[in-house]
Image (cartoon, coloured by chain):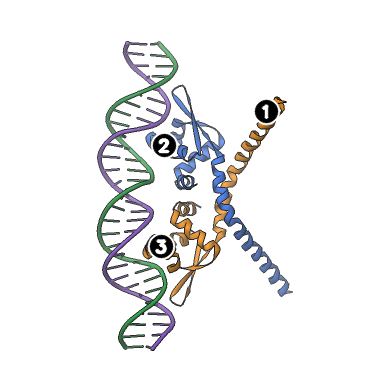
Chain colours: A blue, B orange, C green, D purple
Amino acid sequence: MDAVLQALADPSRRTVLEILRDHPATAGELAEALPIARPGVSRHLRVLREAGLVESRPEAQRRVYTLRPEALVEVDDWLEQYRALWRGRLDALHTEIARGKKDRR
Amino acid sequence: MDAVLQALADPSRRTVLEILRDHPATAGELAEALPIARPGVSRHLRVLREAGLVESRPEAQRRVYTLRPEALVEVDDWLEQYRALWRGRLDALHTEIARGKKDRR
DNA sequence: CGGTTATGTAACCGCAAGGGTACGCACCAA
DNA sequence: TTGGTGCGTACCCTTGCGGTTACATAACCG
C-alpha cells in the first residue's frame, strides 16, 4: 500500500501504467513514449515492479511488461474509508439544494 | 489530481487525513499526534490544503482543520480506468477456478 | 499595554529521488 | 565466434522534500 501510493506519485510512472493499460509493452517501447532516457525508465519500472503494479516476462532479449491492476485494489480499499464521507457530503449538499428549492417556493 | 496523489504519497500526511476523518483538529493537536515538530506539520498542512484535501478556518488564535473528502473523488475517478481491468482479472480467475472444479469432478 | 498562546514562515541542512552517461550482460543472427 | 540489440545496474550530480531551530504575527488575557 505504502509502496503503491509512493509509486503512483510520479507522473512518468503513471504514464507507464496508462500505456500498459492498453497493451503490454517492452522496456524500449515505454522509454520511447517517455521524455526520459532508457535507464531512467528502467528504474521506474523497477519501482513499479516492486510495488506489484507491473510484471515482466523475458522474451528473447526484450522484456515485456504487463500491468497488474490488482495492485490498485489496495488503493481502492484505502479510499473506501473516505468514500462514505464524500458521499455523505454530496448527499448533504443535495438535501441542502432540495431544501433551498423547497424554501424558495 | 497530480497534487492530490503527490500529497497522498507521504505517510505523515495520510495520518493527518486519518485523524481528520474522525473529527476536525487544530494544527497543534495534529502536531502532537505526529512524530515531527509543529513547523513540519504546518508545511504538511499547506500541501494538503493546496491539494484541496483539507480546509482551515480560524478560531481565535487556533486554526481548525477539516477534511475535504471530495478531493479524493479525483483519485476514485482515476482508479475507475483500471477498475474494470482488475475486475476482469478476478472474474477470469473465478471462471478459471470454476473450470478447475468442473474439470476435477 | 504586555505577556502568553497558537500558528505560519524563513533560513538552513541532510538525504533520498530522479536524471544522465558509461558499462556489463544476455541473447539472437550471421 | 563475433557483432549487434535490448536491458539493467553502477556511478555521479543536481534538485527537491522533509526535518529542525529561530523568528514574525495575530489573537486572547491580565
The residue sitting at 41% across, 37% down in the picture is A41
Q: Which mark is residue B100?
A: 1
Q: CA distance from mark 2 to mark 1?
A: 39 Å
Image coordinates of residue B73 in percent, x first then y, are: 57, 55
Q: Can you say whether A86 is above or below A102 in the image? A: above
The answer, for residue B47, to whether it is visible in the render is yes
**Of the residues tagged 2 and 3, which is closer to the observer?**
3
Residue under mark 2: which chain is it in? A
Labels 2 and 1 positioned on one and the same chain: no
The residue mark sitting in front, 1 or 3, is 1
Gap between marks 1 and 3, in whole Å?
53 Å
**2 and 3 marks on the same chain:** no
Q: Depth check: B85 or B25 in front? A: B25
Nearer the observer, A35 or A25: A25
Reply above or below: D3 against C3: above
Marks 2/3: CA distance? 33 Å
A53 sits left or right of B84 in the view: left
**Circle 3 is placed at which residue position?**
B41
Q: Chain of mark 3?
A: B
For the residue carrying disc 2, how many other residues have a C-alpha within 10 Å: few (<14), some (14-19), or many (20+)? Answer: many
Residues at discs 2 and 3 in contact (Cβ within 8 Å)? no
Q: Is residue B53 visible?
A: no
Q: Nearer the viewer, residue A80 or A58?
A: A80
Q: Which labelled disc corresponds to residue A34?
A: none
Kind of residue at disc 2: Val
Q: Quadrant of residue C28?
A: top left
Q: From the viewer's perspective, is residue B12 above or below residue D12?
A: below
Residue at the spot 57% in from the left edge and 59% down from the top edge: B70
Q: Amino acid at mark 1?
A: Gly
